[in-house]
Image (tube, helix red, strand yellow):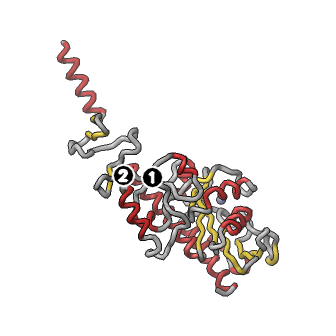
Amino acid sequence: MTESSLRADIVEVGRRMYARGYTASNDGNISVRLGADRLLMTPKGVCKGFMSPDMMCITDLEGRKVQGDRDPSSEMLMHLEVYRQRTDVHAVVHAHPPTATGFAVAGIPLDRAVLAEVLATLGSIPIADYATPSTKELPEAVRKYIKAYDGMLLANHGALTVGPDLFAAYYKMETIEHFAKISLVARMLGRENLIAREELERLQALRGTYGIKAPAPLCPPDGEPAADDPTCQFVQAPSGTGMRLVPDVIDKTAPRAAGSSGAPGATRAGDEVEIRLTYRELSALIEDAIRSLR
Ligand SMILES: [Zn+2]
């Protein structure tokens, strides 16, 4: 890739991010490796939807500006940390896509085994701890996960994706936002059936056949501490005992309709049968009960 085509690609990715609403105003930043010790990066304080190739900055891996009229991105430290930790990474994309960022604000990682293609490519998406933007806290928060993940949410901030080239990193941002939207819809519908652990292992074996290979394997099934293990990807996937999909059993507090019992409004969780009634049905039952007492 020549420098001029990389500059043009950054402009194009910025335009797509802005058009899709992943960034507002001057949010977000993009960088690519230009050589062994050179990065090409979006400048500070410009709208990513309206950049031109000449705006980009060239820095070294310490963040010193080598070329460019403008100063490098305010999130440069986060980008530098990624390149230091991952020699295989050639591009870094940061944005605030609204649905994924909503999960980051709610503190809900995208780590449930729900979408086969996400599991076969990115794996799961954790949330890096909250850090003040543009300070050195942010690279520290990212460092914890970057060895094992190509994409992560940043608590109360946004999302970060990396890849072997710019479009690979950008498409992961699209995948995360798409995954977040689907997860949100499933949760609004009241249920997320999960892919069973056994099927998850089959999907893991398919990694690479989609052209995207996650940097670390999935964590072994048992033990909560795995959620913080930086050498593997934590995924919520219960054993299916023969079934490839498992009815949502993790979040028992979430309201659910029609479970395996078949009766609308009733669902079976362990030995307890949960029944959901509308307000009108409940009022009718109470009125009936009062009437029978008279
Ligand atoms: Zn940001």
Q: Position of residue 21 (x, y in %)?
A: 55, 64
Mark 1 neighbour density, 10 Å: few (under 14) some (14–19) many (20 or more): some
Amino acid carrying label 2: it is Ser
Which residue is tagged 1? 221
For the residues labelled 1 and 2, say whether their Cβ atoms are less than 8 Å apart.
Answer: yes
Circle 2 — which element? loop
Amino acid carrying label 1: it is Pro
- Residue visible at 27% across and 29% down? 282
Q: Position of residue 236 (x, y in %)?
A: 44, 52
Is residue 110 visible in the rendered image? The answer is no
Q: Position of residue 242 (x, y in %)?
A: 28, 55
- Residue visible at 38% across and 53% down? 186
**Inter-mark Cα distance, 1 to 2:** 9 Å
Note whether ligand 1 is within 8 Å of mark 2. no
Mark 2 neighbour density, 10 Å: few (under 14) some (14–19) many (20 or more): some
- Residue visible at 45% across and 64% down? 118
Which residue is tagged 2? 239
Q: Position of residue 110 (x, y in %)?
A: 49, 55
Q: Which quarter is ligand 1 in?
A: bottom right
- Residue 105 - label: none
